[in-house]
Image (cartoon, coloured by chain):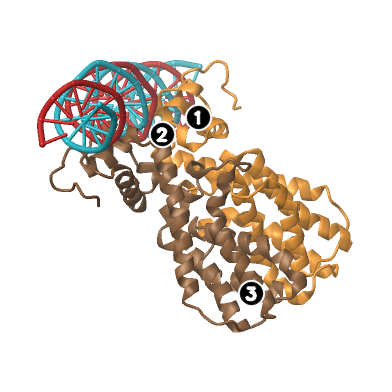
Chain colours: A orange, B brown, C cyan, D red
Amino acid sequence: MPVARVRDQYHHGDLESALIATARKFTKRNGIEHLSLRKVAQEIGVSPSAAYHYFPDRDALMAAVGFSLFEELADYQERELAKITGTTAKAAKERYRALGKTYFEWAIKEPHFFNLMFSEHCLVDSKSEEKREDNRAFINLTKCLDELVSTGALEERMRGHSELLSWTVVHGATSLIVGGHLDPENYESILDDLEFSLGIRK
Amino acid sequence: MPVARVRDQYHHGDLESALIATARKFTKRNGIEHLSLRKVAQEIGVSPSAAYHYFPDRDALMAAVGFSLFEELADYQERELAKITGTTAKAAKERYRALGKTYFEWAIKEPHFFNLMFSEHCLVDSKSEEKREDNRAFINLTKCLDELVSTGALEERMRGHSELLSWTVVHGATSLIVGGHLDPENYESILDDLEFSLGIRK
DNA sequence: TGTACATCAGTGAACGCGCGTTCACTGATGTAC
DNA sequence: TGTACATCAGTGAACGCGCGTTCACTGATGTAC
């Protein structure tokens, strides 16, 4: 919170962040469908029109929430990865697992967040630079796979095939489960299947 | 269209189907977000309240549209599969490919449909029997994989790992691409990676 | 240090809207006798 | 074959609502001199 906290009621101080944070809170509880600018403004204690100094429209606010969630997911993954130290094949395998598990746990814990992130509101022109929003998570995956190779846990000839395969399996299983089309109990065994197919042995 | 077509204006004849069909049409064009009962009723030429004889509420109509789309997807897949005849390994591989490609093509052609199908509106209790909605597509996959094994294109030891892996890769890649998080050009090579990892050789 | 002024960050009222849903109703239909 | 009546499948008006957005505005702040 910025300096001018007490003596200032008229100027909020950091309304943009507050809008995103509050929109986030509502999304977490009820999903995007029930998110309205007016409710967000009211919760903050500000008039609805104030939001228009920061976002051109409602959609822009929702997109801002979505993009901030991608950052948070990456933060969470990196925190969990950091807990697993060591340069052995075993450690590398554990980190690879952790990457898949954190993605899933994040989604299951806050399905409304996951839905927003991959909804039309965060739809990104596939030619634009903005696809980098995903990139932190993808870079983590890249690193993990490189480590698997350098520690001998993954054969070099599988490396090229492993990247998009890991990505799509983890995302696909997670979103099918979040959508209720697959039982959560299958998730671990899907990761097993993935590792097995890539030739990563226990 | 039923018999009493001309002499009857008051009774529509098959309003339930008309509601679904029209809701489908609107969804195709604009997505679920902009679908309203009133517009659907108006398009059909019926009062909004008439819909309540067939659906308890708006959500129920949207869910009905969604579930009918699962059927259509399966129909489409089966039509495409039927075009590839033969009991050779080559034919089995082609059918397996076709399964993955039709899923993707369906989604790309009508992204609003795909989004509805995997949205919260078609969220299904994962314990309920209704998960069979997916089943026809899954049964097709099962058959394809069995053929791959019986023709020698897929090793028996990979069979168990192939089912959920194929499913999640295809769904994951498709939904990432539809969501703009992955370039469509990657799709074919992801299928290549999948086949390669399962030991299916060209 | 004081003042004038541009700019920033809000207010609050209003517009205009379409929405989902309810309710008492009526026209059409099918059926038992 | 004709009639009474239950049931089915619609109407249409109304309720009550919250919504996104615009607009002219004003209070607070920062800055140049």
Query: Image quadrant of residue B38?
Result: top left
Q: Nearer the viewer, mark 2 or mark 3?
A: 3
Q: Which residue is mark 2?
A: A53
CB-based contact (under 8 Å), mark 1 and mark 3: no
Is residue B41 positioned above or below B193 on the image?
above
Q: Chain of mark 3?
A: B
The dot on residue A15 is 1
Residue C13 relative to residue B143: left or right: left
Closer to the camera in the image, C9 or A72: A72
Q: Is residue B12 left or right of residue A184?
A: left
Q: Chain of mark 2?
A: A
Q: Position of residue A38 (x, y in %)?
A: 42, 27
Q: Position of residue A189 (x, y in %)?
A: 75, 55
Q: Quadrant of the N terminus of chain A?
A: top right
Q: Which residue is mark 3?
A: B147
Give a yes or no on whether discs 1 and 3 share a subunit.
Answer: no
- Crowd rating for badge 3 (residues with CA inside 10 Å; few <14, some 14–19, many 20+): many
**Residue A138 higher or lower than B131, as above or below:** below
Q: Secondary structure at mark 2?
A: helix
Res B35 → quadrant: top left
Name the element at disc 3. helix
Lower sequence index among marks 2 and 1: 1
Which residue appears at 36% of the width and 49% of the height? B27
Chain letter, disc 1 residue: A
Q: Secondary structure at mark 1?
A: helix
